[in-house]
Image (cartoon, helix red, strand yellow):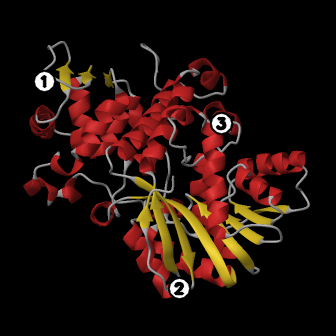
Amino acid sequence: MTAGERVDAARWPDVARRPRGSAARTAATRLLVQRALAALPLRVALGDAPATGAEGPLLRVHDPYAFFRRIGTDGLIGFGESYMAGEWDTDELVGALTVLASHLTSLVPRPLQRLRGAWAHRRPRAQRNTPEGARENIHRHYDLSNDLFALFLDRTMTYSSALFPRRPAGWSDLAGAQHRKIDRLLDLAGVGEGTRLLEIGTGWGELALRAAARGARVVTVTLSHEQRALALARIAQAGYADRVSVELCDYRQVTGVHDAVVSVEMIEAVGEEYWPVYFETLERLLAPGGRIALQAITMPHDRMRATRTTYTWIHKYIFPGGLIPSVQAIEECAAPAGLRVKENDGFGGHYAETLRLWRERFTEQPTTVAALGFDGVFRRMWEFYLAYSEAGFRAGYLDVRQLLLTRAATTARNGDPR
């Protein structure tokens, strides 16, 4: 959003208008937030006042009253909306957000954490992942524009964490790292010549393409019209239309028996309420002796439990209806379905680098983003989303893991898949 650019109130009503709130509440919020920020390695400049703090990224609050009022009314949703409105900025967005993510549990004084319900909104029922709700939730994100995603993704059009090689030069080869990740998942699931593979969550088709190149027969399902259209075109262009079927349907509607099931960063969109159904569906669709390979973003179990009913900025603007699971939650929901985690490998640092590359590609093309019809508020929102996510992985608040599930009762192992 450029200086002087007007916020479209019809499109961004809660960014265009400041939330209602008493002066007393705003003053109390200012006191608490300033005290919390003063304890962090951040420099903070409020309005025209000189910056406080001796080290760290500089947080410039251009409109202190609006900034504190939004936070006092809407918590972290208000913090994100204040950035979208251009009321604060920083010389190092990822750095500032990483500091905040690293101290997330201590930012609010412990006695006030018990009053979380006073400022943390609960998730709206409209975002429940019923079959109808899931379609709408997926539509709001993945059907934005294939051209938008093509701006910052690599040529494989893969929208999940890459897996980079150890050598430093490998951190820049995003397409190669995405193939490395996909190939490891296909190896984990035992996909080869003649394998009947089910993919839950098509994306734009790259995993299905690589599985077909191995000789597999692939059924891949998605709820995104935009993704399906491009995936079909890419599959046809590659000459694999006879091996890959791209279905527009909910995972709960899938039928048949499959030797392997692969699902990449889709469980986060399922919703806690439906995790048991998700794993029951996986087990139902799996042939005897089959293997399930999942890639999932995870968070610590205690943080998941503490925030699982909270309505966040991410839910409101980016991923409605989602919840990031813990590994423990995955194990506990899979067990009643007769599934056990046999392998469990984490590589969260690789996601931070993936997001860095996406963010840099996106922020380098503001004119092209605008030409696609996305205004300044959207551009700040999307930059904040990518930086916010990157910070979560850099702080260790988030991780990403590849898991192998089978019907056999086995012991999970932890390690780095590199």
Q: Which residue is drawn at 67% across and 84% down?
A: 289
Tag 3: residue type? Answer: Asp
Classify residue 369 as left or right of residue 198: left
Label 1: which residue? 53
Dot 3 falls on a residue whose secondary structure is loop
Depth check, front residue: 94 or 399: 399
Depth check, front residue: 306 or 346: 346
Q: Which of marks 3 and 2 is in front?
A: 3
* Looking at the image, residue 232 lies above or below residue 214: above
Q: Circle 1: is it few (<14), some (14-19), or many (20+) Cα within 10 Å?
A: some
* Looking at the image, residue 15 lies above or below residue 263: above
Label 2: which residue? 337
Classify residue 159 as left or right of residue 360: right
Q: Position of residue 268 (x, y in %)?
A: 49, 60
Label 3: which residue? 154
Tag 1: residue type? Answer: Gly
